[in-house]
Amino acid sequence: SQKIEQNSEALNIQEGKTATLTCNYTNYSPAYLQWYRQDPGRGPVFLLLIRENEKEKRKERLKVTFDTTLKQSLFHITASQPADSATYLCALDGTGGSYIPTFGRGTSLIVHP
Amino acid sequence: NAGVTQTPKFQVLKTGQSMTLQCAQDMNHNSMYWYRQDPGMGLRLIYYSASEGTTDKGEVPNGYNVSRLNKREFSLRLESAAPSQTSVYFCASSAERSRGEKLFFGSGTQLSVL
């Protein structure tokens, strides 16, 4: 069955460094992959979408890569700030024609000043 | 612009009680969704409505019913609440149910069933 894996352990980094979060998937070939940010007590907020034929996508300090051979997406935040502290979720477009995003469990990012 | 609005924000129920979670969106979106989020489990789809007048089961529909009241509103009903339904519930909407469509989420309802 389709499986999406994100590191369950929190990622702690120092302000100004680049944060890199990983999303791995198995038994699936998604056409799209999305990244969302979730703050405590809030719903997820869409950040970026990358298509299977795109290797890389950028938006301001954010960069997403999508390697369909490795079945992996990397999410980078450059020059990280304490305000970037949140949980980041990856989502793959659904199977069976539903097209509804299926979410990973998310990775918590903590940026220390 | 409110986006997706959910009510209530918090609710405590006793086992066997019923309740309805309300969701409304003001973005003229066609598709709406209900997810639940549990620690260590991530977001799981309960039900969705691809368009007004249609509803379909998601990954974890047992114990729930939904109503797409109109294009704006999509409610989730627990007929007889169970402790296993203690969770945070999120409503979401998207312009269409198509590949790559991004979802807009509400702030969630934290439900505890005792």
Image (cartoon, rainbow, N blue to C red):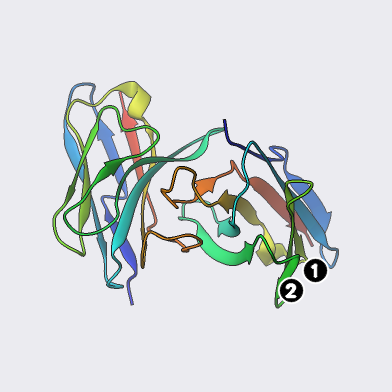
Pointer 1 residue: A78
In the picture, which quadrant includes the N terminus of chain A? top right
> Chain under label 2?
A
Q: Camera-side residue: B21 or A50?
A: A50
Amino acid type of the residue that numbered disc 2 sits on in the rendered structure: Arg
Query: Horizontal placement of B17 versus B62: left or right?
Result: left
Q: Camera-side residue: B14 or B84?
A: B84
Q: Residue at x 79, y 56 (%)?
A: A20
Q: Residue at x 19, y 59 (%)?
A: B52
Q: Is residue B42 above or below residue B105?
A: above
Q: Where does residue B107 sit, x and y in percent of width and height?
A: 39, 56
Extreme left residue here?
B69
In the picture, which quadrant includes the C terminus of chain A? bottom right
Q: Secondary structure at mark 2?
A: loop
Q: CA distance from mark 1 to mark 2?
A: 5 Å
Q: Residue at x 53, y 64 (%)?
A: A46
Q: Where does residue A36 sit, x and y in percent of width and height?
A: 57, 58
Pointer 2 residue: A61
Q: Where does residue B95 sit, x and y in percent of width and height?
A: 36, 68
Q: Where does residue B57 sit, x and y in percent of width and height?
A: 30, 38
Q: Which mark is residue A57?
A: none
Q: Camera-side residue: A31 or B64?
A: A31
Mark 1 crowdedness (10 Å alpha carbons): few <14, some 14-19, many ≥20: some
Mark 2 crowdedness (10 Å alpha carbons): few <14, some 14-19, many ≥20: few
Query: Horizontal placement of A88 versus B36: left or right?
Result: right
